[in-house]
Image: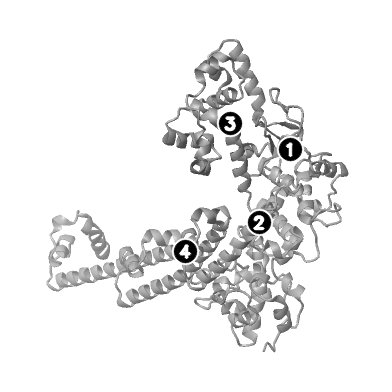
Amino acid sequence: MLTIRPQPKWEESLTSYLCRIAVRNEISFLEIWKLVNTGPKSKVQNIFGYKLDIFPHEVINASTLAKLLCTSNSQIEDMTFYPLIKKFFNNHESVTQVYNYFMKNHIIKEKRRFCPKCLKEKGFFKLIWQVREIEICDIHHVSLKSLCNNCLREQPYISKSLAFCECYYCQTALKTENEEVVNNEVFIMDQLQKYENWRYILHPTTELVTEKEIDGLTKEKTLAIKLLFVAQGQQPKLKWSSVKSLSRDKVRNFTGLVCDRTRFQKVFIADLFHVLRTEHLSVERFVNIMVQSSYIQSFQAQIQEKEPGFCLTPWCSDGGTRKMIIELSGDGHHLKYKHRYSSAWICSSCFMRYGFSRYTNQWGNIANEIQVISEVLNFLELGLTREKIREELKLGVHRANEIFGYLLYHELLSDHYVSFYRPKSQRNLIVENFDEIKNCARNAQYMYNVARRLFNWDQVTFYYYYASREFKALLIKESSKRKQSVVQKAKRHREAKLSIDEMVQNNVGVTVKELAHTLDLSEGTIRYHGINVTAKEINQDQRESNLQQEQVKLVDAASEYVKLMNEKGEPIYSKDIYKYLGRSRKFIRKNFPLLYQWISEQIRLSKIYQDQKKNESIMALIRTARDKLIMAGEKVTVKAVYSKMGLSYNIFNHSKYRKMYSIIKEEMNI
């Protein structure tokens, strides 16, 4: 079918090449896409053509396309951003969604960018021109463009005109020679450095890291370690406080990735460039840096499986042993302190929580609860009141009552306090009614609000029973139930993908509410499984697609209206043209700024034209009045001309006629 197959040019994008192929074989770009399409049929549209350049395997069968073009799979991939993914991930197929997500902010997919001089010299569109931070041509040092010089319209990403390097709308050549050169040397040097970095990570034969660089670790983990090493100034051991080029969250996430504490963290392009630019390194220099073995060993100490330590509570009957220590789920009560502790355990005897510090890697009591309770006991022995203790230790009301409830239940207070504070109710109603309050089991204050509404309890009574072994055991059990099932999540995502594809095919807006209704799930479940992120991205794509389609219609309608009014010789008013388009001025300005500028320019030109017509009409009246005065043998004065025109001389100072007065004087050389 494709009998004419010109060779692809160096750095040419796949879509540019396919557009050239299509024109040479007298078929459309979409016809070629349909032959190799693997995605939804509804997505085979020009507005989604950018996907072939970003991640071709998501939408086409590269092997089939390679056979059609008599080339190889690798040559197809080399014309896209796909070589970049190989440098970040081992398993290329499993990260398609993540890849699309983190590429989204780096690639311009709404319009086609180009260097007019390069188009004239070489006649094709480079892939690297679509990188958002690339703003000039590295050869000619002119700004990259996306507008036609003639009609000032943005060029769509895919069109038949691409093959001819012409404007999609007016067929004017996009290739020109007279372009203004950028003179800012600092800016040019910065742009050339960005070209160098992007070319390196897009080159099919280069690598950021290799699997052999750090034995036994994947590319993702090796890259995470190397970025931390460089961001820390290439020090011999990992020390969080010394990492200057990354945020604390990023350090924690990368460490979690290396130590298998998270499956979802990835190293993104933005992370790489942020570190390199902060440390003033090129990608090539980064690749040549070797991580010290001592630095790698500091991670290996954290990777080893940790055995929990002993219960450190002085008043616990099982203190100094680990026989009652049980591990909490990742969704447990240490959640508030998860940025400080890598994992959490609890003693089922005294219910004190423990974990390994992310900073020191030492076993310790979470939130220093033992120390706080010991200080409260010391103050009580000194005779301080509860309010005074709160002030000294700077405790909130709920926190203070929680500690007193714990002390009461575990019989750590004197008889005086026990007789004064012990609840009168002997029934642990929050255990009996656990099902009614378990939905807020992560927050003691929320549970107290429910208990107060149900049982009319005060805080001391609630926190006494909150500290009970029965209730704590139920909390731990409920926490373990919340462990997210990977199988269930995968199933939900598969169902959601099928539903989303169907909604897109039927032109239904993909929203969390609509998706929840389609899957017969609650909106909370959709968010819990992270499906809302996918829905939001698809919805954004739909919105952009709809706006692009609407822009084409609005541009055509605006051009038609302007042409009609110009043919009639009638003025173009802002109110009338926006009413004709069916969209407000505010909407056009926000969503289609270039169209808004074009409309404003047409209104301005129309006003100039109408003013010229009006002036010509006035001049004709003035000349007629003057000729009549001359033929009657009367003296030609401004007052006489006004009189012949049927106007009173006294009104010439009025703003409406002041310009006419100056025109008369100029015409008569008075």
Say what secondary structure mark 1 lies in.
helix
* Three-letter code, disc 4: Leu
Left or right for 200, reference 628: right
Gap between marks 2 and 4 measured at Cα: 47 Å
**Mark 3 vs mark 4: which is more N-terminal?**
3
| Distance from the alpha carbon under mark 2 to that under mark 1 | 30 Å
Which residue in the protein does label 3 denote? Answer: 468
Q: Mark 1 points at which residue?
A: 240
**Which residue is identified by label 2?**
486
Name the residue that disc number 4 marks.
594
**Residue at mark 3 to residue at mark 4: CA–CA distance:** 67 Å
The colour scheme is one colour
Quote the CA–CA distance across marks 3 and 2.
33 Å
Residue at figure coordinates x 60%, y 86% from the top left: 27
Q: Are marks 3 and 2 in contact (CB under 8 Å)?
A: no
Q: Which residue lies furthest to the front in this view?
A: 426
Which residue type carries mark 2?
Val
Query: Looking at the picture, does residue 211 appear above or below residue 461?
Result: below
Q: In this view, does 312 lie to the left or right of 177?
A: right
Please name the residue shown 67% across and 51% down the image.
186
Judge the density around disc 1: few (<14), some (14-19), many (≥20) Cα neighbours within 10 Å: some
Residue 199, image x, y percentages: 74, 62
